[in-house]
Image (spheres, grey):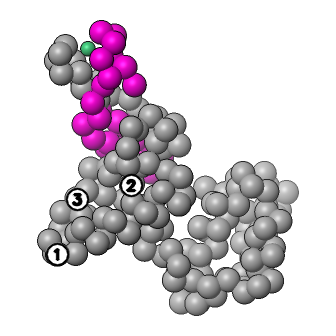
Amino acid sequence: MECECGQMLNLCGVDEVDATTCMARFSCEPCGEYVGIEGERAEIAPLLPHVCWSDEAQHVLNRMPPYVVPLYRDDVERYAQTTGTKLVTFDFLGEAKNQGTVAWSAESLRRLERVPPGIRAMARIELERTALERGMTEVTVVLMEEIKARYFGMGSTQTVS
Ligand SMILES: [Zn+2]
């Protein structure tokens, strides 16, 4: 992101406006200008020069015991890298926490590989989150069938959100 004067804008922070919208705040020091860019998370994340915690996610971090913070931050940012996002939101912290704690049966993994690439990551997150909510330790084929029916059944074309 560049200012009109040609300087690179500094990223000051990101606010979560609502469940899907974020506002990234940039500044240009030489001009003393502030720029806010609002959009869907998926639109904002690519504009960020580095991994950035939203104010809401930062707030969670600030409330943790100081000795936990560096470890926790590293874990979350490593997970952000594996998922290819630069924006750490409050919801993302929940996803990061779930990471790796749910196993996949061999058959359900095979099925996941057949999910179109565009929605595979979301499907994976949704399945793991649902499994955890129910206290399951493994994503099973039965669960996959159920989720598939919920999102793609009944003639609905709604995408996973
Ligand atoms: Zn400027």
Range of residues picked out in magenta:
1-25
Crowding at mark 3 (Cα within 10 Å: few <14, some 14-19, many 20+) = few
In primary-sequence order, the first of circles 1 and 2 is 1
Where on the picture, by quarter, is residue 116?
bottom right
Taking 65 as reference, is 46 left or right?
right
Q: Is the residue indicated by label 3 positioned so its CB lies within 8 Å of ligand 1? A: no
Task: Report the residue marked by disc 1.
Answer: 67
Is the residue 130 above or below the residue 153 in the image?
below
Q: From mark 1 to mark 2, how far is it between C-alphas?
A: 22 Å
Residue occupying the far top of the picture: 5
> Do labels 1 and 2 touch, CB within 8 Å?
no
Res. 147 visible in picture: yes
In the rendered image, the quadrant that contains the N terminus is top left
Residue 18: in magenta span: yes
Res. 16 visible in picture: no
In primary-sequence order, the first of circles 1 and 3 is 3
Task: Report the residue marked by disc 3.
Answer: 59
Q: From mark 1 to mark 3, how far is it between C-alphas?
A: 16 Å
User: Which of pointers 1 and 2 indicates the residue nearer the eye?
Assistant: 1
Return the x and y of residue 11 as percentages of the image width and height: 29, 35
In the rendered image, the quadrant that contains the C terminus is bottom right
Name the element at disc 2: loop
Which numbered circle lies on residue 89? 2
Crowding at mark 1 (Cα within 10 Å: few <14, some 14-19, many 20+) = few
